[in-house]
Image (cartoon, coloured by chain):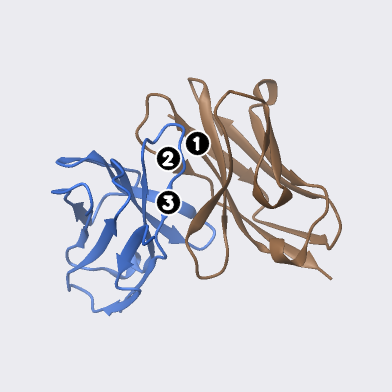
Chain colours: A brown, B blue
């Protein structure tokens, strides 16, 4: 069965600093991987997705993620944090034979002025 | 564009009562999902559907039922509400699960007292 593990339920960085949110996956087949963002009192929206076309995936708002098969990781990064990036971020996985998307437990990102 | 619409936005139920959370989408998506979100637990899949007339259990189906009589609608039924069902419920849809974006509703905040 597919699953994702997000390391760190809360990450706090200073404005302008590097953002790194960690996600490791488990899948018996080549995975499709996603990062979603949730702003307060809203639903989730897609940041980016990996579907095997390229290992480095660029998303919206300056975020990107790199798929590393050897490490079973799909960490999310942004070079310079903005106050508007404060939100909860979810890693998710679905595989080519599955009909469902499984989410991680989420990481809350706080930005210090 | 309406996207995925959930009603109601808020509801308070007494223990043992029943209710239906409504979800409708206007994007002609085949796949629809119900998730619940609890603090620190991420999103847990309750039920999903790959098309009209087809539903299947997710990670946490106990205490819930669903139906999918049309492509547009995917209601979630709670029978005999319990305090453990206090949560935020999200409905989502996607054209295809494996490698496409899921679109989320705004959520229904349910409290069982």
Q: SS class of the residue under badge 3? A: strand
Looking at the image, residue A38 lies above or below residue A59: below
Looking at the image, residue B87 lies above or below residue A21: below
- Residue at 69 percent across and 38 percent down: it is A65
Whole-percent x, y for residue B37 in the image: 44, 59
- Residue at 42 percent across and 65 percent down: it is B106
- Residue at 23 percent across and 79 percent down: it is B14
Going by the image, does B60 lie left or right of B70?
right
Q: Distance between the residues labelled 1 and 2?
A: 6 Å
Q: Which mark is residue A8?
A: none
Residue ID for mark 3: B103
Whole-percent x, y for residue B18 in the image: 17, 70
Looking at the image, residue A47 lies above or below residue B40: above
Q: Mark 3 lies on which chain?
A: B
Which-is-in-front pick, marks 2 and 3? Answer: 3
Q: Do the residues at pointers 1 and 2 share their chain?
A: yes
Q: Around disc 1, counting alpha carbons within 10 Å, would you say few (fewer than 14), some (14 to 19), or many (20 or more)?
A: many
Callout 1–callout 2 Cβ contact below 8 Å: yes
Going by the image, does B89 lie left or right of A56?
left
Q: Which mark is residue A93?
A: 1
Q: Around disc 3, counting alpha carbons within 10 Å, would you say few (fewer than 14), some (14 to 19), or many (20 or more)?
A: many
Which-is-in-front pick, marks 1 and 3? Answer: 3
Whole-percent x, y for residue A99 in the image: 34, 34
Q: How far apart are marks 1 and 3 (CA)?
A: 15 Å
Q: Which mark is residue A101?
A: 2
């Amino acid at each position: 069965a597919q699953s994702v593990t997000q390391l760190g339920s809360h990450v706090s960085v200073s404005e302008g600093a590097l953002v790194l949110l960690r996600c490791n996956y488990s899948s018996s087949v080549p995975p499709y991987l996603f990062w979603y963002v949730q702003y307060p009192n809203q639903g989730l929206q897609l940041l980016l997705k990996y579907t095997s076309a390229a290992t480095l995936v660029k998303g919206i708002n300056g975020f990107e993620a790199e798929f590393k098969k050897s490490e079973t990781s799909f960490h999310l990064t942004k070079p310079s944090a903005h106050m508007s990036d404060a939100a909860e971020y979810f890693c998710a996985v679905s595989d080519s034979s599955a009909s469902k998307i499984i989410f991680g437990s989420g990481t809350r990102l706080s930005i210090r002025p | 564009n309406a996207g995925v619409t959930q009603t109601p936005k808020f509801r308070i139920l007494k223990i043992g009562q029943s209710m239906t959370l409504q979800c409708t989408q206007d994007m002609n998506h085949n796949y629809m999902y119900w998730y619940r979100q609890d603090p620190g637990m991420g999103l847990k899949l309750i039920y999903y559907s790959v098309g009209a007339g087809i539903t299947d259990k997710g990670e946490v189906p106990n205490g819930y039922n669903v139906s999918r009589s049309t492509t547009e609608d995917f209601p979630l039924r709670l029978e005999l509400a319990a305090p453990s069902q206090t949560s935020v419920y999200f409905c989502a849809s996607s054209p295809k699960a494996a490698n496409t974006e899921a679109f989320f509703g705004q959520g229904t905040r349910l409290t069982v007292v």
